[in-house]
Image (cartoon, coloured by chain):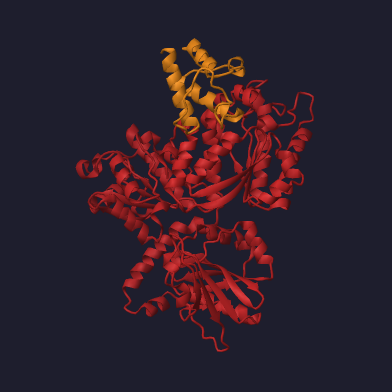
Amino acid sequence: MLKELIYPFDPNYILENKRKLKKQLLEDSNSFVEKKIAILGGSTTSAIRQMMELFLLNNGIKPSFYESEYNKFYEDAMFDNEELKNFAPDIIYICTTNRNITKYPDLNSDVDALLNNEYEKYNGIWKSLKEKYNCPVIQNNFELPYYRLMGNKDASDIHGKVNFISRLNMLFYEYAQNNENFYICDINYISADYGLKKWSDPFYFHMYKYAMNVNAIPYLSFNVANIIKSIFGKNKKGFVLDLDNTLWGGVIGDDGVEGIKVGPEEPEGQVYSEFQRYLKEHKQLGVILNIDSKNEYENAIAGLKHPDSELSEDDFVEIKANWEPKDRNFEQIAKDINLLPESLVFVDDNPAERHIVTEQLKGVVAPELDSVEHYIEYIDRNGFFEVTTLSNDDLKRNEMYKQNAERAKAEASFSNYKDYLLSLKMKGIIKPFEPLYIERISQLSNKSNQYNLTTRRYTVSDIEKIAEDDNYITLYGKLIDRFGDNGLVSVVIGHIIEDKCHIDLWIMSCRVLKRDLEYAMMDELVKKCKERNIREIRGYYYPTAKNAMVKDFYSLQGFSKISEDEKGNSEWSYVIEDDYKLKNEVIEVED
Amino acid sequence: MTREEVMKKLNEIFCNVFDDESIVLKDETNANDIEDWDSLEQINLIVAIENEFEMMFDMAEVSDLANVGEMADLIMSKL
């Protein structure tokens, strides 16, 4: 990732050097996912597009764009548009602002009617887009107006522009709460954060037809790119945190527990407490916390036991406190919890440590922390964990990683691995896709990189379509054991073409590696094939930088290789015999 | 700042915006001389120039700039 594009960035530098930055991004990596993004704008969007491109490339997404003619968002959405149809967008971004509000109320208006008219216009757009393109839609809300005719009363009186915009925004949010695949880009917050007066400088609209200050565009595009990367499963998953001068002030090895600064006694301690609370809040989003600190282990724990510490030992999944190089600890943490290093954010006040970690582990981000009162800003504004969908699994993730650690301990007490698996008393639920799980299934298809045979990505609407299509065999797998519920952790999509079942997708969450769930899934797939009189299954393995762990997957399942090209893409065949013997012996699968 | 220094800075900005080190500005250089210089890039140029010279132009000033020379004169007048 380019440092220039990580918050706090220099918007002027990015605007001026966009061509150079783009070149650099394209040279730095060759593993991009390609996405088609339609920008339907209510004002000039050229620079918004250019900036989005940079931030998306920085997140491993290579966009191609469709851009409306000037202020043609309504026409493009409502009427048939050959060009947009052929473009077939993966995502649509409706970039409207308060410059697009058709009519504000005056003192004689029927305000509710006006409000309804304005809302219905957008509601019509969203409906039409869903019908025509059925892809995720990102919609700007409205920023506050540039002036207030009634002064402060503009906020509370229904005739005020401030009041009107606030109510309109609330209607947008209601729609967002009730419709999947619809996301609000909160320009109301972004403009306030930037400074409304500067953001709304009328010069840029009258001169160039930009609805906001051109210098603010990097911030807007950064936010839109964050929503997009989140939708496509490119969020970060956790923190790796330093201790001294990061979670508390001072050096515990030198100052002792009583000497470190945390808690309400003095200003510096208060700021560290606030930062600790901020980190702790992430746990409810399923973001996991780990420690990577150069300290004696006992000292680290003693610090976390400080009576005023908001975070305690229990809040962390992995605690590495030793004198090893930080990058090695970091790598080990990622390995222990089955995540890729680049999905963890490194938080350390020491620039030298940040340097070694980001140099040694490609793709790891380490925000530039300076003074503790900026820690929250510099982490939060980066949108590492931008939430687009909140699944139950996210909410329980910390719990699950903890359970994994307990399982690892249990495993150590068995000499025979199968005995260990039996002792887990696993129960599996393996069934065709159900509406309740569509969101999670799509999420898993976008997040799984390692245990993923074909690395195909599916949006919620893709999954909906497949679930209803009789030409597909779909299976999801949930796994429960005596330590807890792992949730929905595996997905298989088989495409029936004539007399064969072609496996388009086979993925599994790494949190249930080596539990034989893949065999239980295979048993179920075979059963479904038999029911349809299908006697042959074809499997495909497409190697990527991340999925080497499933290179021999089909061979282990008893498939035979039919072909392999020079890139390592291989095709496998499995002929179902009448006396197929169940492969899974350790999971009790519910009927 | 002398007019030569202003031109030199302008030249750097143009090189960055168009990512082209070979650009050499003259007073009479205008949008016809640089391939990617369209009305949208014009906006990016103005914004970059404002940021570099730490000044703001008003609408009347940027509306009828004919070439780089006039831009340099405008900057000189505001220094």
From where the camera sits, is residue A156 visible?
A: no
Q: Quadrant of residue A347?
A: top left
Count numbered badges in the picture. Answer: 0
Residue at image location 47% in from the left, 22% down from the top: B10
- In front here: A433 or A28? A28
Left or right: B3, with A493 as reference point: left
Image position, residue B34 (x, y; %) = 54, 29
| Position of A393 relative to A569 (above/below) | above
What chain is the orange one? Answer: B
| Position of B34 relative to A396 (above/below) | above
Residue at image location 44% in from the left, 69% down from the top: A551
- In front here: A129 or A272? A129
- Outermost bottom residue: A579
Residue at image location 25% in from the left, 51% down from the top: A325
Image position, residue A152 (x, y; %) = 62, 22
Left or right: A566, with A305 as reference point: right
Q: Colour of chain A?
A: red
Image position, residue A356 (x, y; %) = 30, 46
- In front here: A469 or B64? B64
- Outermost left residue: A254
Which quarter of the rendering shows the N terminus of chain A?
A: top left
Which quarter of the rendering shows the C terminus of chain A?
A: bottom right
Image position, residue A142 (x, y; %) = 64, 34
Q: Quadrant of residue A42?
A: top right
- Outermost top residue: B77
Q: Quadrant of residue A110?
A: top right
| Position of A3 relative to A516 (above/below) | above
